[in-house]
Image: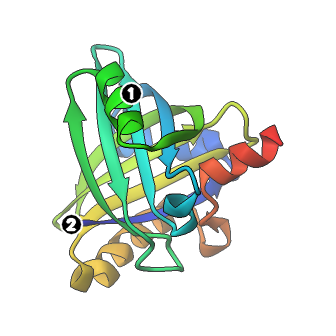
């Protein structure tokens, strides 16, 4: 399973970062993600730092749904996790299958995103500007796929792109949106 080599940061000047992304990589793609995270009834999936998610993405030209499983973190500093993801044809059927297997919905929320896909140092990267209506702030997620023995070099490329956007180590966060949304709702 490939590792999602990812760094996430709080953006202190969203307008400046947006302008830099647009100048370098074009207009980006505005999308709304509707995420539902599932867990075992006893909480053992999330308790083991694993994730099972169904995400429906509403874009300007299409709507698609993906099923994602993320294993436990392989790098505590970045929060990078092994990830397997596949597109599903029928979102409702996917939810029914996951529930039929005994999983329960733990949390669902919306992310408003602008995505930029580009290549840097031979790697395909995805930069996503994120706003979660229930959470204060704007975030950037920058990711690329890596093998476990390639995680360090992959994260170095990700970090260099963030640095070029004026985002430093002090801006990085490993807090998950699921935890932040749950805290706001409690």
Image height of 22 relative to 125, above or below: above
The residue lying at 60 percent from left, 70 percent from top is 168
Q: Earlier in the sequence, mark 2 or mark 1?
A: 2
| Image-quadrant location for residue 132 | top right
Q: How packed is label 1: few (under 14 Cα within 10 Å), some, or many (20 or more)?
A: many
Disc number for residue 159: none
Tell me the CA gap for discs 2 and 1.
Answer: 22 Å
Foreground residue among 56 and 168: 56
Image height of 182 relative to 62, above or below: below
The residue lying at 33 percent from left, 83 percent from top is 152
> Contact, CB < 8 Å: mark 2 with mark 1?
no
The residue lying at 45 percent from left, 34 percent from top is 114
Q: How packed is label 2: few (under 14 Cα within 10 Å), some, or many (20 or more)?
A: some
In which quadrant of the rendered image does the N terminus lie?
bottom left
Residue 62 placement, left or right of 122? right
In which quadrant of the rendered image does the C terminus lie?
top right
> What percent of the width, then of the height, locates residue 151?
30, 79
- Give the tally of numbered discs: 2
Image height of 58 relative to 76, above or below: above
Residue 86 placement, left or right of 59? left
Mark 1 falls on what kind of element? Answer: strand
> What percent of the width, then of the height, locates residue 33?
46, 30
Residue 28 placement, left or right of 173? left
Kindly identify which residue carries mark 1: 56
Kindly identify which residue carries mark 2: 1
Which residue is outermost to the right? 186
> What percent of the width, then of the height, locates residue 24?
35, 46
Which residue is outermost to the left? 122
| Image-quadrant location for residue 172 | bottom right
Mark 2 falls on what kind of element? Answer: loop
| Image-quadrant location for residue 170 | bottom right
């Amino acid at each position: 399973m490939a590792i999602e080599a990812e760094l996430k940061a709080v953006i202190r000047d969203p307008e400046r970062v947006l302008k830099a992304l647009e100048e370098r990589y074009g207009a980006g793609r505005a999308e709304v993600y509707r995420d539902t995270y599932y867990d075992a009834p006893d909480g053992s999936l999330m308790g083991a730092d694993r994730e099972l998610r169904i995400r429906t993405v509403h874009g300007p030209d299409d709507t698609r749904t993906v099923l994602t499983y993320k294993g436990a973190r392989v790098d505590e500093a970045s929060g990078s996790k092994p990830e397997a993801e596949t597109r599903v044809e029928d979102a409702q059927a996917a939810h029914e299958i996951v529930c039929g297997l005994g999983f329960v919905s733990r949390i669902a929320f919306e992310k408003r995103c602008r995505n930029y896909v580009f290549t840097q140092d031979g790697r395909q990267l995805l930069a996503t500007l994120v706003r979660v209506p229930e959470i204060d702030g704007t975030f950037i997620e920058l990711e690329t796929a890596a093998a476990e023995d390639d995680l360090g070099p992959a994260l170095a490329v990700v970090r260099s792109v963030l640095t070029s956007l004026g985002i430093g180590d002090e801006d990085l966060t490993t807090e998950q949106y699921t935890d932040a949304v749950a805290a706001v709702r409690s």
